[in-house]
Amino acid sequence: MSRKPLTNSFAFDTRCFVCDQENEGGLRQRFFLDDEIGRVVAEFIPSADHSGAPNYAHGGVSMAILDDAMAWAIIAIKDRFGLTRKAEVEFFRPVLVGRAYEVQAWVESFEGRSLVARAELRSSKGKLCVAAKAGYTVLTLEEAEQAIGAGARTAASYTGTVQ
């Protein structure tokens, strides 16, 4: 498997609750691009600090992980930034504190300024625990610069036009 770490290389301080490694109050989740399967992947191990019930991870934490994974899929696969417009999440099995889970996210469709992404959180045995589908509004170059600052670097192929 060819996994490339996904990090903030855009020269702006994200303070992202999910993925910023410097955000002490955040999840500090690491994501990777798996070139072989064309998906963003991660290992997620919820701690007791992520619980909703003593042994179960809070559903909002699972949702946040999947939303961020989809956002990284947009960046890593389509070289764009997107804002979540609508998200649907379905919980199939509890996510247990202290256990390892696999996260995968991918872009399902991209047309104009609309993009649909999907993500899944699976147990170490491959059982689907949480699935998400979300619609995103793709930012133009001008909107991305407004969101992150004009001095920040965007992806080299980010031309401001959308496919």
Image (cartoon, grey):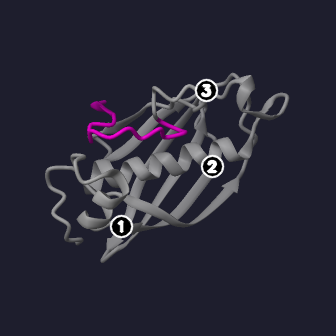
Q: Earlier in the sequence, mark 3 or mark 2?
A: 3
Alpha carbons under labels 3 and 2: distance apart? 14 Å
Residue 10, image x and y in percent?
A: 27, 42
Q: Residue furthest bottom?
A: 112
Q: Which residue is mark 2?
A: 63
Query: Is 28 situated left or right of 161 in this image?
Result: right
Alpha carbons under labels 3 and 1: distance apart? 30 Å
Q: Secondary structure at mark 3?
A: loop
Instruction: Kindly identify the residue that appears in the image at 36 percent across and 46 percent down.
Output: 39
Query: Is 137 in the magenta?
Result: no
Main SS, magenta region, reads: loop
Q: State the image quarter where residue 146 is shown.
A: bottom left
Instruction: Kindly identify the residue that appears in the image at 31 percent across and 30 percent down.
Output: 1
Q: State the image quarter where residue 61 is shown.
A: top right
Query: Is 60 situated left or right of 141 in this image?
Result: right
Q: Amino acid at mark 3?
A: Ile
Q: Is residue 30 above or below residue 66?
A: above
Q: Earlier in the sequence, mark 3 or mark 1?
A: 3
Q: Which mark is residue 157?
A: none
Mark 3 neighbour density, 10 Å: few (under 14) some (14–19) many (20 or more): some
Whether residues under marks 1 and 2 lie with C-beta atoms below 8 angstroms apart, the answer is no
Quadrant in the picture for the C terminus: bottom left
Instruction: Kindly identify the residue that appears in the image at 53 percent across and 38 percent down.
Output: 18
Mark 2 neighbour density, 10 Å: few (under 14) some (14–19) many (20 or more): many
Instruction: Kindly identify the residue that appears in the image at 24 percent across and 54 percent down.
Output: 150
Q: Amino acid at mark 1?
A: Val
Q: Which mark is residue 45?
A: 3
Mark 1 neighbour density, 10 Å: few (under 14) some (14–19) many (20 or more): many
Q: Which mark is residue 138?
A: 1
Q: Which residues are magenta?
A: 1-19
Q: Secondary structure at mark 2?
A: helix
